Amino acid sequence: MDKTTVSESGDPGMSTTRDSSDRRFNSSNTGKRKMNDTASGSNENASASDRKRKMTVSDKESGKKPHLSALILARGGSKGIPLKNIKVLAGVPLIGWVLRAAFDSGVFDSVWVSTDHSKIAEVAEEFGAQVHRRSPKVSTDSSSSLDAIQEFLRLHKEVDIIGNIQATSPCLHPIHLQDATRKIREDGCDSVFSVVRRHHFRWQEVKTGGVDTKPLNLDPANRPRRQDWDGELCENGSFYFASRELIEKGYLQGGKMAYYEMLPEFSVDIDIDIDWPVAEQRVLRFGYFGKDQLEQVKLLVCNIDGCLTDGQVYLSAGGEELVSWNIRDTTGISTIQEQGVEVCLISSRDCSIHKLLAKKIGCQLEQNAANKLEVLELWKSKKKLSWEQVAYIGNDESDVECLKKAGVSGVPHDASSDAVKAAGYTCRNSAGRGAVREFADHILLLGEQARAKSQQKKTLKSVCS
């Protein structure tokens, strides 16, 4: 059984955590909780809690609640994966997953990204976050999260409580943040942090030249079975909530503390899972996809030029136009058709080869499409579909409005910048080199996500009640 435990301790707790650009990538789901209050320790921490309660009472009397700010630290200098915080994961920049959860939780008075990199700042603003341009002093490899948070608080006097969310936790859900916030606002906690239960037997490290080790958390003579051992709670780094007062004193954990336990299957370590597609599979299964109810895609519309082909046109000696396409892409179309998704092709040009291709793979074709959106709207209307049931893959400015309208939208890796900004998914593969197959696979995975989402919601509510 998962739980949240609160304690009031004389030990203020750890004072630093690593920045999101270099800490381990973990994210989890939450579970059932029970409160277990204990009181002990220093007058300083007791006083801190008393002052917190007095502040809360005062704020209630004045009709003003303490300002809670979400703060995502996203330094640009990741050593393991360059600009990891905005690397696209399952069609969304990594930092976008936690920003979406933060906004949809509805518990924050402001949502900020602290960064030293212009590209990260641009992505953060596209998702609606405010940007704090951190100073070089707190942007070094040796800078801690605490350093960056303290700088932020010095410049934002309106903030009373910080919810420090790690950018590398793409499976974070709004309900996790909502439950953590309740511990702060309703239960009077000064700090709340996320943990995960691990069943790892630990042994003392043997330094160079040594041979003898010792168990740290087990008796080898009475080695327990996994089901007979509760395991240990370890920080997973998804979030740290703390009051301004604690942070200014140099602590992220202290006063009246609560941990928030999450299920291990929702943890992903991006520093170890360098194989990005593997991480994407985990996110597609356990990630948060937004408030909107996902629907099954019934229609995929594909721009031939620059998506199904690489955009190049060859001329034969006889003056005939020649184009090529990748068998992986046509196989992807066949696969998605077998799953009940109709595929239509669209082009702004008139080309006889396009007709041959459409006939070969069994797709409706519209050529000389001066206004692609009009064609798309006509197809949607005739087939009596909602926009959520329409998917579109394009690559250029002429596709932007279609990409914005479609419920699921994608672009090849080498698409124009305007198209990339309008799309929900950016393929790893380029046009004519597997992008359509990748997007078709993405649609099928989203279909699985749509079928599983209702069950996921039920599970979350069940384990959190």
Image (tube, rainbow, N blue to C red):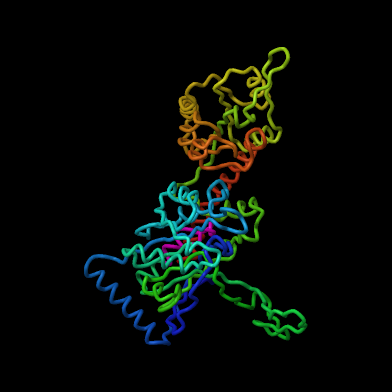
**Which residue is more in the foreground, 282 or 129?**
129
Residue positioned 44% across, 60% down in the render:
135
Above or below residue 60? Residue 84 is above
Q: Residue at x 59, y 62 (%)?
A: 265
Say if the magenta span includes residue 169. Answer: yes
The structure residue drawn at horizontal position 34% and vertical position 62%, both measured from the top left corner, is 156
Q: Quadrant of the N terminus?
A: bottom right
Q: In this rendering, would 252 be left or right of 327?
A: left
Nearer to the camera, 275 or 381? 275
Which residue appears farthest toward the left when viewing the image? 62
What span is colored magenta in the figure? 166-180
Quarter of the image with the C terminus in it: bottom left
Residue 7 at what x, y percent from top left? 44, 80
Q: Is residue 188 left or right of residue 24?
A: left
Instruction: Give the percent coordinates (x, y) of residue 87.
Output: 57, 50
The quadrant in which residue 67 appears is: bottom left
Seen in the picture, residue 453 relative to 204 is either above or below; the reply is: above
The answer to which image quadrant residue 37 occupies is bottom left
Q: Is residue 68 above or below residue 400?
A: below
**Residue 306 lies in the magenta-colored region:** no
Location of residue 21 in the rendering, given as x and y in whole percent from the top left corner: 55, 60
Residue at the top extreme of this rendering:
318
Labels in figure, total: 0
Residue 428 coordinates in the image, percent (x, y): 62, 43
- Identified at 72% across, 12% down, the residue is 318
